[in-house]
Amino acid sequence: MTQTSPKILPVLLVGAGPGDPRLITVAGVEALQTADVVLHDRLVSPALLALAKDAELIAVGKTPGGLSTSQADINARLIELARSGRRVVRLKGGDPFVFGRGGEEASALVAAGIPIQLVPGVSSASAAAAAVGIAVTDRRAASAVTVVTGSEGDGDAPAVDWNAVATVGGTIVVMMGWRHLDEIVERLIAGGLSPDTPAAAIQQAWTPEQRAVFAPLNLLRVRAQAMRPPVTVVIGQTTLLATPELSWTIMGRRVLVTRAATQAKPLVERLRALHAEVIELPTIAIQPCEPEPIDRAITRLQLGAYNILALTSVNGVHQLWEALRRHGLDARALGDVRVAAIGSETARALERHGINADLVPQVFTSDALADALIADGLSGQRVLLARAAQGSPLLRERLQKNGATVEDLALYDVATPSVDEVALSELKRGVDVVTLTSPSTARGLAEIVGAAVDLDSLQTVCIGPVTADAARKLGFRVVATAETHTIEGLTQAVGRYLASLPPLGDSRLESA
């Protein structure tokens, strides 16, 4: 019997992007998720490697001045693995074809008769500058950008003509040149570039270890002498037009999210978009209440026993619809009932179930909801107030005093979950901000930390005044309250507070 050779699949040369794992392309993610084996560079994020769940991971990185895998060995390994019939991904930082030796690997594979597929990545040539608000081209200062390697002599390419680089104009981006920067600066100045040309050095862009130094070209090395590769150097007038205020102060700041695990994602994603380091420590867990009272209320709701349905949280909407589904019902069960929502997020949750809220107060608090309902007229109205078991009696009492018959229905209970010890240890190590989205999250956090953390030492940003009042009574230090009592408003409040802080010291950022 003749043994057939395994089918050779294309080797995918994939760009991982500049550092933040979210900056990989969708095609790059798909390649990792289907890989059998991944050969990866030294600085690739572990979060990206985790996407290749069923793949063998092989580190083939190069360490400046340290242990490295030779390019010849990498090429040979790629060929060997591809010929074994495995789906091979070569994962490289930035873009494989921008100073990534992707062209060399592609040529070696093609010469060996192995097909290739390129998945470009976001190159640090522009992304590192963008991380601190530098646009490498700007109509006010530069209509061209020159990207040049500072590591000459590794291959057969002609040496960099630094005189030409100095005179071409626009922005100069030097990659992989930190160890030779003194010589590079000397040659640029000899080529006609002014020693006073504004410049910036960005270390480990798009990671929590990012650091940036802005200084005149001839002083950059001295003022950034503590930096270690990878460092991208940007030279030119565009560095003076940088808009890095948010990145300078937020990059690397640690923010604690206390929301229930099932609800934390929208807040976590928004905070990470600010380049904050997010730690998730759920301090509450949502548990449905006993179904019998809820089922009786659903039956009455279907029979038209209520004039008004008032909902005070997104959780309340979810639990109400779970109860409707148990009865085989949907939005039609509400019939002619007027629906009131405490705020925009609760109203959006209703919209997802086909209900447009009839009443949403301009300020998203229980008091504002009561004011709006009272202004609408409550005399003789039958109100179903559907909410958490821990809801304050004040809302019910105000509605009753103004002529309504109120049924206060507990849809869900708020409990303290099992403690995430890893997240708790991160909190003890120190955070810059704690986010609180309800009085329950504040109480849960106080219960979880006990005496291990001084609550007054925690800088808390609260979603609204009710949460802020509860936090202060527990001993938290409230440094900001969202102007709009939504997750987006909370994110903005966190961003404004962190942006008001000084940079993270000399180890993170310096400015000329």
Image (cartoon, rainbow, N blue to C red):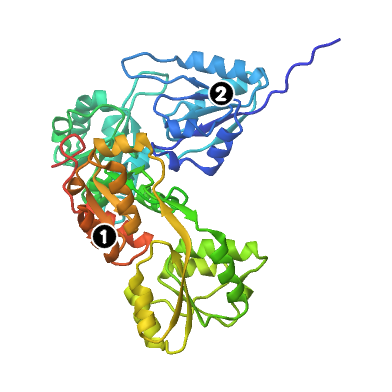
Q: Please state which amino acid type lies under the numbered disc 2.
A: Ser
Residue nearest the observer in this picture, 419 or 277: 419
> Callout 2: few (<14), some (14-19), or many (20+) C-alpha neighbours within 10 Å?
some
Horizontal side of residue 93 vs 299, given as left or right: left
Q: Residue reaching furthest right?
A: 1
**CB contact under 8 Å: marks 2 and 1:** no
State which quarter of the image contains the C terminus: top left
User: Residue 107 has which mark?
Assistant: 2
Q: Quadrant of residue 27?
A: top right
Residue 309 position (above or below residue 505)? below
User: Residue 470 has which mark?
Assistant: 1
The x and y percentages for residue 60 are: 46, 19
> Callout 1: few (<14), some (14-19), or many (20+) C-alpha neighbours within 10 Å?
some
Q: Residue reaching furthest front?
A: 292
Residue nearest the observer in this picture, 148 or 285: 285
The x and y percentages for residue 153 are: 35, 18
Q: Please state which amino acid type lies under the numbered disc 1.
A: Ala
Residue 251 position (above or below residue 392)? above
Q: Taking the image as drawn, is residue 208 in sight? A: no
Residue at image position (38%, 36%) is 19
At mark 2, the secondary structure is helix
Number of the front mark, 2 or 1: 1
Residue at image position (18%, 44%) is 503
Residue 473 position (above or below residue 51)? below
User: Residue 171 has which mark?
Assistant: none
Q: Quadrant of residue 177?
A: top left
Horizontal side of residue 354 vs 72, given as left or right: right
